[in-house]
């Protein structure tokens, strides 16, 4: 592990009741790059990224064992602050799920929740954002998500009045508003048309300059197009991981070759 | 994900086409050499027919490869195969062309005595036929090892060409009436030397197709020792400015 | 008979059923309105009853019913919502949650007279609240609580899980998610539950009878622990026990009309509120 590792998992296992969904996953994810996770349905890719921001906690009967090291801290340990973990590691879901509130409120929700950390007289405390600060955050987030131009005149309109692709970018803006270090994407484009998909893919490549991006995708072409590193999962195990070019031109493992050439029955 | 039936079918068809072309090219060259060795003019039509077929297949395979790329996004082994095919057809095409060129020159050899006189030419032709044979074989059998060894024999061919050149030069200087035949002889040697080079190219493509590694280009000139055999699959390239666009 | 003909037959049948329902409603309202409209006057609405309910107004009954509704809303809405939140968010699949759900469903089916007896025993006697608005109101509350819990629970469950996930992925705690997202989006459904519960409570007679509704009072209730009149009972009393049934018939209809209008009025308010929240959180 070196200074350019954002996430490092050690012997990660996930159980859903009796079902052993993830088996001993050891993986390193680099900072400021796009890492894609591919594999057939049910191979554990979504389960894997949900371990990173403790979203598997929401599923009853799910237990996660092993270490998930982010920035030197084990995110999966019992005394990790889950709220803080989720502030630093954002997630965008498969089906766009903006809140049925205004666009402004969608983006402002999380920053308002967490407040502003301020140091005053040697002590750190939280305070509310001023209207100016909040406006600034909303604009900045929407710009970064490549949505500002399209919505700047109708921030008070409902988030659900946008098109699918715009809604997904709104969800991205919402996550960006609290300035995470890592953003996880769980098949973000599967519900979108090709043009909206292309816009989001461009956005992802742009985001990697400032954030660590991990994307689960069932489209190998998408993984090939946008990711720097690719990890291939099969039946709960990490089979191979490497540079995207290497994986798609000369994979090391037979299973990987079978999957990406479409010969996995 | 269900196996990609259309894609697999297309790849199989491509395989058949390239096999046919490889065999045709090999046969064309062999027949051309046979023509000169035995002064058998009857083979000329066969060589010409084969050349036409080779040209057709060249176009067909070219188009077929592009179709597969456009429609099916091949990756990994499939991609390397297609890359090899696209490049190979050019070299195979040259086999056919040189075979025809050699066959055309036969008119000038009259009784073939001139050809028989130059031992080195005969040796060279055997050697080159062998290289062509092995190149096609290595492709059909996906034999990376055999592909890699082709370069060594190419050095011998180059050396023979130099020898023939000097010999024929002497031959022409002895008797100016022999100049026409002499030039033709040099041309034949030249064509065969080029065929050997093209066969070595094919070897390089086959090596990459099978192992995913590129052969060291310095091997062309015979300057460098062979790459270690067990490090065929090696760790990914160091990342620099990866440009995905 | 071929498919299309069958389709027409079924459709006509369904339409007829719907029409019968509509017709019943119209007949009901019409009957009561025509019977009581003549006696509906400002005086009727604002004066105390005189001469054993045969003259004067029904103000105490109106006020009594209103206060009862107030108690019911104040008690059932918070408890109902909080129980529903507990059911949906915290104890979804555990055995305790299932037992609780079962209890709620069963309680909803208990006859109102049984609740009346319950009220009498617990509130009037045991807790010593006596025959008062409070006893009656609390009894009605317990009666309508299951309904409120069910409706709220449906409304809260109907909020998609994706919203909860999104909120929690942004770092909100479970409670923050409920407060900022689940509850607001469930409000339309909760208001519907409120409408149903309160409407039902407004019209119940049996529990009132057992917890102290008065036949006739010349004054308005003096606080929640005082005796009271209520519209449903008033109508019952006048229709069965008054001295001159024929003469007071118009009064009965008028009182029934007032009750109907009161319930309608409350429904309209709740519908307006529901609409407002539906507009606010458009899916």
Image: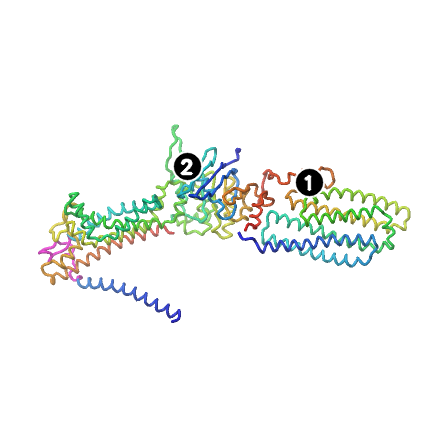
Tally of numbered discs: 2
Residue B34, percent from left and from top: 80, 53
* Region in magenta: C36-59
Q: Are marks 1 and 2 in contact (CB under 8 Å)?
A: no
As drawn, is B238 to the left or to the right of B120? left
As drawn, is B188 to the left or to the right of A196? right
- Label 2: how many residues lie within 10 Å, few (<14), some (14-19) or many (20+)? some
Q: Nearer the viewer, residue A205 or B172?
A: B172
Task: Indicate yes or no whether the magenta region holds residue C55.
Answer: yes
The residue under the point 69% across, 40% down is B216
The image's mark for residue A84 is 2
- The image's colour scheme reads rainbow
As drawn, is A18 to the left or to the right of B138? left
Closer to the eye: label 1 or 2: 1
Residue designated by label 1: B216
The residue under the point 49% across, 39% down is A24
Residue A140 visible in the snapshot: no
Task: Indicate yes or no whether the magenta region holds residue A18.
Answer: no
Screen quadrant of the N terminus of chain C: bottom left
């Amino acid at each position: 592990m070196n200074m350019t590792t954002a996430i490092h998992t050690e012997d990660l296992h996930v159980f859903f009741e009796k079902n052993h969904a993830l088996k001993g996953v050891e993986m390193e994810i680099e900072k400021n790059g796009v890492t894609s996770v591919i594999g057939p349905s049910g191979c554990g890719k979504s389960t894997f990224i949900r371990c990173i921001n403790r979203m598997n906690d929401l599923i009853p009967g799910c237990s996660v064992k092993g270490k998930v090291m982010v920035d030197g801290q084990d995110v999966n340990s019992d005394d990790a602050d889950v709220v803080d973990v989720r502030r630093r590691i954002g997630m965008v879901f498969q089906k766009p799920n903006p809140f049925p509130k205004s666009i402004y409120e969608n983006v402002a929700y999380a920053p308002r929740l967490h407040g502003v950390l301020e140091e005053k007289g040697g002590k750190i405390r939280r305070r509310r954002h001023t209207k100016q600060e909040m406006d600034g955050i909303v604009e900045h987030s929407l710009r970064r998500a490549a949505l500002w131009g399209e919505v700047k005149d109708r921030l008070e309109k409902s988030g659900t009045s946008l098109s699918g692709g715009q809604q997904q970018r709104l969800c991205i803006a919402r996550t960006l508003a609290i300035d995470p270090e890592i953003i996880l994407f769980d098949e973000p484009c599967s519900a979108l048309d090709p043009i909206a998909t292309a816009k989001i893919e461009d956005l992802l490549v742009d985001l990697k300059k400032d954030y660590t991006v991990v994307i689960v995708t069932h489209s190998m072409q998408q993984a090939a197009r946008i990711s720097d590193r690719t990890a291939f999962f099969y039946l709960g195990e990490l089979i191979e991981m490497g540079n995207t070019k290497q994986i798609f031109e000369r994979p090391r493992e037979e299973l990987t070759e079978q999957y990406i050439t479409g010969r996995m029955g | 994900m269900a196996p990609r039936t259309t894609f697999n079918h297309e790849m199989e068809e491509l395989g058949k086409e390239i096999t046919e072309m490889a065999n045709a090219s090999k046969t064309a060259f062999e027949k051309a050499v046979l023509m000169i060795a035995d002064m058998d003019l009857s083979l000329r039509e066969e060589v010409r027919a084969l050349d036409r077929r080779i040209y057709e297949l060249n176009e067909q395979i070219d188009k077929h490869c592009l179709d597969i790329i456009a429609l099916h996004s091949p990756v990994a082994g499939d991609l390397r195969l297609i890359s090899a095919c696209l490049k190979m057809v050019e070299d195979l095409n040259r086999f056919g062309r040189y075979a025809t060129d050699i066959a055309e020159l036969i008119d000038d050899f009259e009784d073939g005595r001139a050809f028989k006189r130059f031992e080195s030419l005969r040796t060279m032709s055997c050697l080159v036929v062998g290289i062509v044979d092995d190149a096609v074989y290595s492709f059909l059998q996906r034999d990376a090892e055999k592909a890699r060894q082709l370069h060594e024999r190419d050095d011998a061919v180059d050396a023979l060409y130099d020898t023939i050149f000097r010999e024929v030069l002497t031959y022409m200087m002895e008797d100016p009436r022999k100049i026409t035949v002499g030039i033709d002889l040099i041309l034949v040697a030249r064509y065969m030397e080029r065929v050997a080079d093209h066969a070595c190219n094919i070897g390089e493509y086959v090596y990459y197709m099978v192992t995913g590694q590129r052969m060291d280009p310095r091997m062309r000139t015979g300057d460098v020792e062979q790459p270690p055999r067990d490090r065929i699959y090696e760790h990914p390239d160091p990342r620099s400015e990866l440009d995905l666009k | 008979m071929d498919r299309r003909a069958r389709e027409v037959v079924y459709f006509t049948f369904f339409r007829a059923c719907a029409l019968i329902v509509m017709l019943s409603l119209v007949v009901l309202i019409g009957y009561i309105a025509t019977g009581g409209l003549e006696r509906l006057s400002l005086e009727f609405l604002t004066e105390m009853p005189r001469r054993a309910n045969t003259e004067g107004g029904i103000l105490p009954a109106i006020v009594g019913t209103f206060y009862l509704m107030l108690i019911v809303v104040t008690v059932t809405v918070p408890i109902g919502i909080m129980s529903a939140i507990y059911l949906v968010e915290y104890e979804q699949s555990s055995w305790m949650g299932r037992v609780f759900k079962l209890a709620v469903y069963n309680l909803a089916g208990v006859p109102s007279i049984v609740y009346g007896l319950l009220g009498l025993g617990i509130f009037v006697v045991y807790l010593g609240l006596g025959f008062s608005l409070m006893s009656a109101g609390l009894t009605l509350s317990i009666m309508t609580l299951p309904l409120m819990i069910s409706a709220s629970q449906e409304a809260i469950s109907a909020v998609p899980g994706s919203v909860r996930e999104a909120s929690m992925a942004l770092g909100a705690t479970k409670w923050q998610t409920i407060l900022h997202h689940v509850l607001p989006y469930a409000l339309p459904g909760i208001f519907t539950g409120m409408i149903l519960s309160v409407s039902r409570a407004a019209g119940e007679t049996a529990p009132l009878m057992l917890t102290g509704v008065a036949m006739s009072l010349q004054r308005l209730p003096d606080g929640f622990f005082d005796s009271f009149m209520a519209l449903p009972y008033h109508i019952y009393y006048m229709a069965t026990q008054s001295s001159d049934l024929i003469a007071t018939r118009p009064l009965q209809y008028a009182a029934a009309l007032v009750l109907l209008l009161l319930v309608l009025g409350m429904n309209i308010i709740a519908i307006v509120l529901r609409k407002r929240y539906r507009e606010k959180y458009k899916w």
